[in-house]
């Protein structure tokens, strides 16, 4: 959620007087017509993974897909103006949503109605890619004898570590920073996320 400093950045960027009623109007539009759809509680594990494993495009793609699937897109199109777009460039930096807003502004109703159907297919694709990422086997433990054979022979699935450590995921990510197979999986997920975004905004 954008904090006071972030909000001030967008106000500076769009030259709005903080006492102006336009501030309330802008923040209402951002919250009501974009973020209410783009953010959801069930994203929490994926967004924590994105944050700690450095997957920015994956996070952008998740928010964009939720916006396309849950948002009132025709109503959102009516609300698009320069200030709204600037918000997602300077305050809450979200290039996928920013590009989508620019595209949405020029679409007709029939084309807009097709967006959720396409987004649903892409959601399945991104979910599979994320599943591949968290299914990666990683070495865990001290490298010596373990009562748990997978920790010594072949590794443990990343998702087990993620869901056992959601509130301390930064420790898991730090310990796996040098895992080359996980680094390759990370690049593959980021590429798929970028491709998903391109399918919607390209």
Image (cartoon, rainbow, N blue to C red):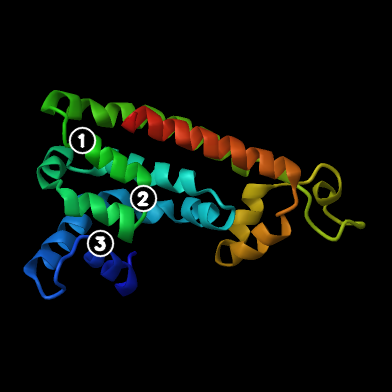
Tell me residue 71's x, y (percent). Answer: 22, 43
- Helix, strand or loop at mark 1: helix
Mark earlier in primary sequence (1, 2): 2
- Of residue 22 and residue 1, the one placed in the foreground of this image is 22
Image quarter hosting the C terminus: top left
Tell me residue 165's x, y (percent). Answer: 61, 62
In the figure, residue 180 lies in which quadrant? top right
- Residue 136 visible in the snapshot: no
Label 2 crowd (10 A; few <14 / some 14-19 / many >=20): many
Tell me residue 130's x, y (percent). Answer: 54, 40
Single out the mark in the foreground, 2 or 3: 3
Label 3 crowd (10 A; few <14 / some 14-19 / many >=20): some
Q: Which circle marks residue 104 in the picture?
A: 1
- Of residue 189 and residue 127, the one placed in the foreground of this image is 189
Q: Which circle marks residue 71 in the picture?
A: none
- Helix, strand or loop at mark 2: loop
In screen coordinates, is 71 left or right of 22? right
The residue that disc 3 covers is 13
């Amino acid at each position: 959620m954008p904090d006071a400093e972030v909000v001030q950045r967008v106000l500076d960027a769009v030259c709005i007087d903080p006492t102006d009623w336009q501030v309330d109007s802008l923040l209402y539009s951002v919250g009501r017509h974009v973020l209410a759809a783009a953010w959801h509680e069930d994203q929490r594990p994926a967004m924590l993974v994105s944050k700690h494993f450095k997957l920015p495009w994956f996070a952008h793609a998740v928010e964009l897909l939720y916006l396309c699937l849950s948002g009132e897109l025709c109503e959102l199109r009516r609300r698009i103006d320069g200030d709204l777009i600037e918000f997602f460039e300077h305050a809450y930096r979200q290039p996928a949503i920013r590009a989508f807003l620019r595209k949405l502004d020029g679409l007709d109703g029939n084309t807009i109605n097709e967006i959720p159907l396409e987004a649903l297919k892409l959601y399945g694709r991104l979910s599979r890619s994320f599943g591949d990422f968290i299914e990666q086997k990683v070495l865990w433990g001290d490298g010596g004898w373990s009562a748990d054979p997978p920790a010594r022979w072949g590794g443990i699935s990343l998702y087990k570590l993620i869901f056992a450590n959601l509130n301390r995921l930064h420790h898991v990510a730090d310990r796996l920073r040098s895992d080359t197979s996980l680094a390759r999986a990370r690049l593959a997920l980021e590429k798929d996320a970028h491709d998903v975004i391109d399918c919607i905004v390209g």
